[in-house]
């Protein structure tokens, strides 16, 4: 692979009836890219370098990665939660915090253990195939991400995170903030 032919297909999958695993699998089947990034619909990009950081992370860990993630303010997995993230919904504060996180950690990539939450899933088509895809037997939204992170680990891949890449996540606040 040359330096210039690595690219990431960025997707926000959706399927009626909260069939998230189905939507993820259809997105993977439809792409010609080796690397796909799934973003939650309630995620706000706070770091202008997010795409380049993702490319550099792939180059650092290579095809050993089953999943590369970022950090956020609000998520179920404490390992993916950024320390001291702003408690407000002010995006200006979150952008300043993202800059701080990037200045602190840069392009560092670290190993993660356990089950990951899926606000930011950067995965390869090869790992997805070897892991058997996303579990469509799981109904609804919850647990699809955890199942996939375990499946890629069972398939021999490693989970990684980028502590310098921070996103604001409305998770569990969207019902209160977006009543319209």
Image (spheres, rainbow, N blue to C red):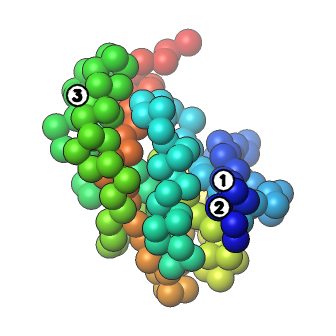
Residue 169: which quarter of the image? top left
The answer to whether residue 137 is left or right of residue 76 is right
**Earlier along the polypeptide chain: callout 2 or callout 1?**
2
How many residues crowd mark 2 within 10 Å: few (<14), some (14–19), many (20+)?
Answer: few
Quarter in which the N terminus is drawn? bottom right
Question: Residue 126's x, y, as percent?
Answer: 68, 76
Distance CA(mark 1)–CA(mark 3)? 29 Å
Q: Nearer the viewer, residue 43 or 57?
A: 57
How many residues crowd mark 1 within 10 Å: few (<14), some (14–19), many (20+)?
Answer: many
| Disc 2 target residue | 3
In the picture as drawn, the residue positioned furthest to the left comes out as 84
Q: Residue at x 46, y 68 (%)?
A: 60
Question: Residue 161's x, y, as percent?
Answer: 38, 60
Q: Residue at x 32, y 49 (%)?
A: 106
Q: Residue at x 25, y 54 (%)?
A: 78
Q: Nearer the viewer, mark 2 or mark 1?
A: 2
Distance CA(mark 2)–CA(mark 3)? 36 Å
Q: Residue at x 65, y 72 (%)?
A: 128
How many residues crowd mark 3 within 10 Å: few (<14), some (14–19), many (20+)?
Answer: some
**Residue 142 visible in this rendered orientation of the protein:** no
Q: Residue 8: which disc?
A: 1
The answer to whether residue 64 is left or right of residue 100 is right
Q: Nearer the viewer, residue 77 or 97?
A: 97
Q: Residue 32: which disc?
A: none
Residue 36: which quarter of the image? bottom right
SS at circle 3: loop
Quarter in which the C terminus is drawn? top right
Question: Residue 69's x, y, as percent?
Answer: 44, 56
| Disc 3 target residue | 86
């Amino acid at each position: 692979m040359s330096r210039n032919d690595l690219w990431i297909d960025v997707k926000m999958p959706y399927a009626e009836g909260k069939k998230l695993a189905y939507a993820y699998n259809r997105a993977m089947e439809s792409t010609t890219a080796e690397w796909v990034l799934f973003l939650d619909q309630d995620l706000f990009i706070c770091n202008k370098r997010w795409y380049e950081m993702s490319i550099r992370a792939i180059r650092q860990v290579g095809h050993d990665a089953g999943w590369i993630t970022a950090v956020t303010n609000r998520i179920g997995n404490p390992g993916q939660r950024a320390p001291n993230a702003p408690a407000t919904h002010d995006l200006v504060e979150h952008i300043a915090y993202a800059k701080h996180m990037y200045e602190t950690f840069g392009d560092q990539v670290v190993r993660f253990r356990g089950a990951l939450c899926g606000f930011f899933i950067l995965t390869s088509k090869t790992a997805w195939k070897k892991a058997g895809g996303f579990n469509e037997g799981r109904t609804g939204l919850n647990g699809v991400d955890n199942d996939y992170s375990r499946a890629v680990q069972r398939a021999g891949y490693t989970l990684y995170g980028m502590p310098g890449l921070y996103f604001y996540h409305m998770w569990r606040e969207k019902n209160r903030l977006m009543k319209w």
